[in-house]
Amino acid sequence: MANFKKLLLVSDNHEDRQSIEDLIHIYEDDVDQMLHLGDSMFDDLDKIWQKMIPIKGNNDTGAGYIKNTVVSLGQAKIFASHGHKLDVYNTRAKLAEEAEKRGCQFACYGHTHVAMVEEVDGILVINPGSITLPRGPIAKKLYAILSVDENRRYQLNYFDHNHLEVKELSASGKF
Ligand SMILES: [Mn+2]
């Protein structure tokens, strides 16, 4: 499948700087966009945000953070939110509803630190996990890359903090 557009997804590094700088160094020229899903706990004017879209987590302060946004990637539209105000520990239905309202096919969130991909009410809902403080069944520090092509196929790949693919989490399909 040729001509992919790629979006890097990372979340919840909770002040760890090295992990985020590593991702920028490795992927800056290789992906179309980088999205941070919250709780970096960096300054909202940090120069890192020249390279990544900064979503506001419950532990982030400053007017430079974005509460919710929609990212376009090829033909895909992706709703992005930290998720703490959408009750994501209990349900991903509110997240999917917000995505649907905005004409998105995907929704991405953080907050739980649990890597997860699931289809909820027709929306593909993705949590890239935490790059420093993993929780849940896969005890690995993770991030993810969402790729979409011109035939509306998507591919989601997870990687650990050593940048090795965690294949049991990968997903693909049409959107
Ligand atoms: Mn949080």
Image (tube, grey):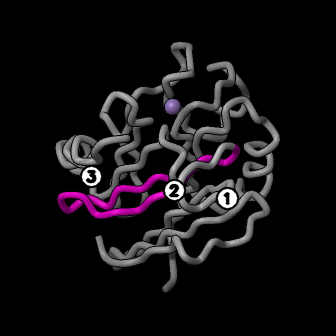
Is mark 1 in CB contact (under 8 Å) with mark 2?
A: yes
Distance between mark 3 and mark 1 Cα atoms: 29 Å
Boundaries of the magenta span: 116-132
Residue located 54% across and 34% down the image:
38
Q: Quadrant of residue 6?
A: bottom right
Residue 147 left/right relative to 11? left
Query: What kind of element bears circle 3?
Result: loop
Q: Which mark is residue 104?
A: 3
Is mark 3 in CB contact (under 8 Å) with mark 2?
A: no
Q: Which mark is residue 55?
A: none
User: Residue 24: horizontal and vertical position, in percent?
Assistant: 74, 48
Amino acid identity at mark 1: Lys
Query: What kind of element bears circle 1?
Result: loop
Residue that mark 1 sits on: 140
Residue that mark 2 sits on: 115
Amino acid identity at mark 3: Cys
